[in-house]
Amino acid sequence: MPITYDDRTVTMEGACGVEEVPALAEWLDAAASPLVDLRSSTHLHTAIVQALAEARVPVSGAPVDPFLALWVAPLLPIAAH
């Protein structure tokens, strides 16, 4: 499973496709002060990026993937540590 959820953080690993969006949207609605960890992600479907951007989910783990670091991470706020 490319996306795992805990109480506050959604962790994305590998390629995360559009089929993950309904569960992600439901979790974002239910989570209090959610965070996203993108360190291990290699591809995010644009619908996932849109859901995260709309919810203004802070990034707790910046992506290592060069494309995601350059084009996706700047769309999301950085989590305060």
Image: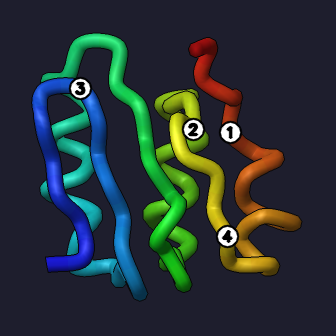
Nearest to N terminus: mark 1 or mark 2: 2
Q: Residues within 10 Å of mark 1 (few under 14, many from 20)?
A: some
Which numbered disc flags the more N-terminal residue, 1 or 4? Answer: 4
User: Measured along the vertical axis of the image, is residue 35 above or below residue 51?
Assistant: above
Query: Disc 2 marks which amino acid?
Result: Val
| Residue at disc 4, secondary structure | loop
The amino acid type found where label 1 is placed reads Leu
Q: CA gap, disc 1 to disc 2? A: 7 Å
Q: Quote the CA–CA distance across marks 2 and 4.
A: 12 Å
* 58 w.r.t. 36: above or below: above
| Left or right, 45 with reference to 34 | right
Find out whether the residues at labels 3 and 4 contact each other: C-beta distance under 8 Å: no
**Quarter of the figure that contains the N terminus:** bottom left
Residue identified by numbered label 4? 64
The residue pinned by badge 2 equals 59
Residue 12 pos. (x, y %) = 36, 64
Q: Position of residue 33 (x, y in %)?
A: 35, 14
- Tag shown at residue 46: none
Between the C-alphas of marks 1 and 4, the distance is 15 Å
* Residue hosting label 3: 8
Density class for disc 4 (Cα within 10 Å; few <14, some 14-19, many ≥20) is some
Callout 2: SS: strand
Q: Earlier in the sequence, mark 2 or mark 4?
A: 2
- Mark 3 / mark 2, whichever is N-terminal: 3
Q: Label 3 vs label 2: CA separation?
A: 12 Å
Contact (CB < 8 A) between labels 1 and 3? Answer: no
- Disc 1 vs disc 4: which is toward the camera? 4
Residue at mark 1: 76
Instruction: Describe the element under mark 1 as helix, strand or loop.
Output: loop
